[in-house]
Every structure is written in C-alpha cells, then in structure tokens.
Amino acid sequence: MFGKVTVIGMGLVGSSVARVILKKRLAKTLVAADADRDVCKVVHDLGLAHQVTDNLTEAVEGADLIMIAVPVGAMRKVAERIAPALKQGSIVTDTGSVKMAVIEAIKPFCRPGIEFVPGHPIAGTEFSGPEAGFDTLFDNRWCVLTPLPDTGIRAVEKVTKLWEECGAMIEIMDPAHHDLVLGITSHLPHLIAYTIVGTATELEDDIKSEVIKFSASGFRDFTRIAASDPVMWRDIFLNNKAAVLEVLQRFSEDLTALQKAIRQGNGEYLYDVFTKTRAIRKQIVEQGQAE
Amino acid sequence: MFGKVTVIGMGLVGSSVARVILKKRLAKTLVAADADRDVCKVVHDLGLAHQVTDNLTEAVEGADLIMIAVPVGAMRKVAERIAPALKQGSIVTDTGSVKMAVIEAIKPFCRPGIEFVPGHPIAGTEFSGPEAGFDTLFDNRWCVLTPLPDTGIRAVEKVTKLWEECGAMIEIMDPAHHDLVLGITSHLPHLIAYTIVGTATELEDDIKSEVIKFSASGFRDFTRIAASDPVMWRDIFLNNKAAVLEVLQRFSEDLTALQKAIRQGNGEYLYDVFTKTRAIRKQIVEQGQAE
C-alpha cells in the first residue's frame, strides 16, 4: 500500500498503528521515530518497525506517509523539525485528540506539494507507552478525519485506507465541530474523572484507604479514566480550551441545579433527570456501542 | 440455615439474593414479597421463591429472617406495615445504600425481641427489576453491616453467614462513616455521571446524535452509571443529603481550580493533578479491585 511510512511518537496509538502496518505488510519500509531514546530502545527490542531512530529528520527522508502521534502540545515542534526533510508529494497525518489547535500547529510547516490530512482515531486505554499498544486497538472504532479546504482527495483516500486496514470506521468532520463533540464525549468526562479522583487524593489517609477498598461502587470507573496519560491530557485541555470551558459551563449549571434539588429535597426533579439519562444509554446500546 | 426467609422487594438485589437462597437451599421456605403485582407475576413465572405475594403482612408471618430490599425511600412504610406481624426473635435486615436514614426509618418499628441488622451489599449493575438479578452478583464484593449498639451478636453472625453464602466479604462499620465513604465512592460518582449525561440530553439534536455516535471516548462509561435505577438513586440522594452535599462541595472546589488552570493555561497544575490520580488507580489495581 505504501513505500515508506514513518510513525513519529511510539506511544499507545503510534505503536498500535506500527503493529498493524507490520502485521499486514502495509509498507515496504516502516520507520518508528521517537524523541525519547528509552522508548526507541523498547520499540527496537519489541521489533515494532524496520528502523527505529530518535532523529526525526532522518526518519522522514523519502517517506510517502508520515503519521505524527505525539501529544498535542508537541505537534508544532515535530512539524517544524521535519518540514525541511519532507519529500515532495508526501502525506502528513496526525492522531491528535484536538483538531483546530493541531491544524494551527502543523499546517504552516506543510509547503505546497505536501498534503496534510488531520486525523483522530477515537480509541485508547488508560495505559501508555509502546508496550501498551496492540494491533486490535482500532477495531470497530471511529477515526475522524478533518481535511482542510486544500487537502487533496487522493491523500484523504490513502489515509482512509490505512485506518480501514487498522479496523477503524471513517467519519469526515469539520475540525471545529470535532473539537466541540469530543469536548463533550471525551474531554469533559476526563476532566470530571480527574477531578473526582483528585478530590479523593486529598482525603485523610484513613478515609482514602476505605475509598480504595470500596471503589467498586462507581468510583472505580472514574479511576480508570483518571489513570490516562497525564501529558497527553494536559495538552488536550490546554489546546481545546474554548470548547472545554464552554461545555464545562453547561455542566456546572446542571450540577448546581441537581445540588439545589438535593438540598431542597426535590425528588421529582431528581427523578426526571435520572429518567432522561437512562434513555441516552438505551440509544447507545441500540446503536451497538455498548451492551 | 434458616427456616423461613422473606425477601421484600424483588429488584436486582432482592431477586439475586433469592436466587442464591433457592440454589443453595439456605431456607426451608423462601417467600418473595413485592408491592407491585406485575413484579410478583414475573417472580412467580421465573420461579424465584416458594411463595410470592404482594401482601407484606402475610409474607413475614413466622419468618426467621426478613430482608428489606426496597428503595431507601420506601423502607419506613415497609417497616411500619410488617411490624405487627413480625415473629418474636426474628431478624430484620436491609440492603439500603444509605445507612443512617434507613436506621431511622426501620429501627422505631423493631420492638424488643426483634433484631435489626442494617446492611449494604456493594454490588449492582445498571439494570433493574427481577429479571436483572443473577446468583453471582455478590461474588467477591463487599457487604457492609452497620449493627447498632443493641444489636445481638448472634443476629449479626446469621446475617454475615447469609451474605458469605452469597459470595460476599463482610465489613463492619459505623453507619455515619459508611454514609460518608459511600458518599465519595458511590453517590458522588453517580451524581456526576447523571449530571454529565443530563447535560448531553439538553444538547441540540444534531450534536446529541454525534455524542451518542462517538460515546466510546469516555462518555460511554458515564452513561452506564447514569442508566441506574432512577427511584433508587433519587432516594439515595434525598436520604444521604449531608454527606453528598459535603463531598460535592469539595468536588466543586477542585473542579473550579482545574477550570481556572485551563483558562490560565497552567499546564503544570494540570499535570500534577493528573499524575496523582494515576497513583490512586495503581493502588486499586494492586489491591486486586481492578486490572
């Protein structure tokens, strides 16, 4: 499918893509690049690519497809570093969880003749690093592409094919709209989970140990989400500020209303909200997204 | 183990206990009681008890153990109804998720010679009703008992044995302390999940359909929790008001601090919080409560 493919950033997502590319022989040459030498060593030992390097310029030379899979806050630096070495006609894509900020970070470094296809595979676990990847991570998961007005259709098709080979389903979306939708479905839930588990970290030691012991009653689900990669998520919140603050405002208003209902003993209000939310779950189950 | 056992309230928890009692023949006679005739019919058709009735007085006559497994808000009415028919020397226990309010609701109706052992099996799913129960619901889950100063040790032992037969591990706790710990590990997470999913229900239709479509990225976990039984949870919040409002206050302060960090672009603060929360998950995994 490709001659030379370079994956930059060998974390959970990058290393999972690399595993698929190797397994399905989607590229003649697969180069894995990571700025962290320890990561490079692990990637090399695991045999996740034909070549492993911490030299980004070398890594992208002659590459037909370059996938940047680093935390959102590191995208600009990577794009700047690789820009001079990019082959005319090559395709750059990324896996960032935020699209507006990533487009701003990468697009200026893509000279005419370099195609840029912003992308976001909606898949992950609470684990991170090259050991955490696996080749079925993207099975039946959505991958959102947010091509720009000047992105060539052939480039979009090629990136689409790659993700489909990874098992993903493709959705084309406007980048600002992506950031709002993901702000609600992903960024806000993570922020809330981080908050509630963070609140627990500040409890007195005796209560904290009991909170861990009896975590099975709801809290445990939050701790899984709140165990996600701290750098990745710091960058998401710093780079999707507007959408996150907007949905957080709505959330806070709704929480205040529930708080007031509890204080006033307004059972009818509580019952109404809790019944509506059950209906949303039903729709997700009906669409085959949960059981 | 028991002569006659009566389970009042054949929802997820009550029907699961009934399944274990029948399967392991823990009682000579198992009576299932529910105020809802439709529920009684389902329980009868599923064969979950030796006798099924909507007459609570009849149900408890001559019973050695009575387990009240109704929503917290219905406990007082049930206790009042059954009180005159309780056999001298019988044991009353409950499964309420709140203990202080339930003790206040039931205790006044236990005349001398009736033992009351307040209990709370920390187990459940987002499904409800007698069809949702299953006999392994309590396997390796905690069941908290909060005996009163005048509760006889033999009664506590008998209730302990029953829960252990159900597969549960027993923890003895002060009722007020139970309400605070569960306020953090269970009630607050549910309130937050209800809020965030509730916020989504008020979105414009086009965004709402996308939120459901891309729910896999964190939101989905919240919808599972927010699909829990509305009556049960309304009653929990109305009956554990003080503890819930207390932990909610701490949560709101922490959320405001994170919001401010996002607005100000304070990446260091975000990184610190996200790193601490990861450590809590690690402890839960180390204690074998998660993978």
Image: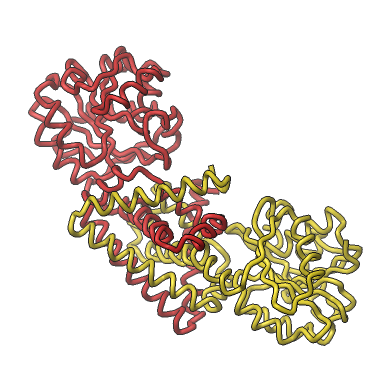
Chain colours: A yellow, B red
Q: Where is residue B219 drawn, in percent x and y?
A: 49, 57
**Outermost residue, front direction?**
B205
Answer with left or right where residue B60 lies relative to residue A88.
left
Answer with left or right where residue A236 lies relative to residue B251.
right
Answer with left or right where residue B168 lies relative to residue A240.
left
- Tell me if residue B134 can be seen: yes
Question: What residue is at 79 percent from the left and 65 percent from the top?
Answer: A157
- Tell me if residue A213 can be seen: no
Which of the 4 image quarters holds residue B51?
Answer: top left
Residue B8 in the image: above or below residue A109: above
Residue A289 in the image: above or below residue A53: above
Question: Which one is nearer the viewer's eye here, A51 or A192?
Answer: A192
Question: Which one is nearer the viewer's eye here, A267 or A36?
Answer: A267
Q: Where is residue A124 drawn, in percent x and y?
A: 62, 59
Quadrant occupied by the N terminus of chain A:
bottom right
Q: Where is residue A64 drawn, in percent x and y?
A: 86, 72
Residue B154 in the image: above or below residue A105: above
**Number of labelled discs?**
0
Question: What residue is at 31 percent from the left and 30 percent from the top?
Answer: B160
**Outermost residue, top direction?**
B28
Question: What residue is at 33 percent from the left and 64 percent from the top?
Answer: A254
Which of the 4 image quarters holds residue A71?
Answer: bottom right
Q: Where is residue A91 drawn, in percent x and y?
A: 81, 74
Question: What residue is at 37 percent from the left and 29 percent from the top?
Answer: B130
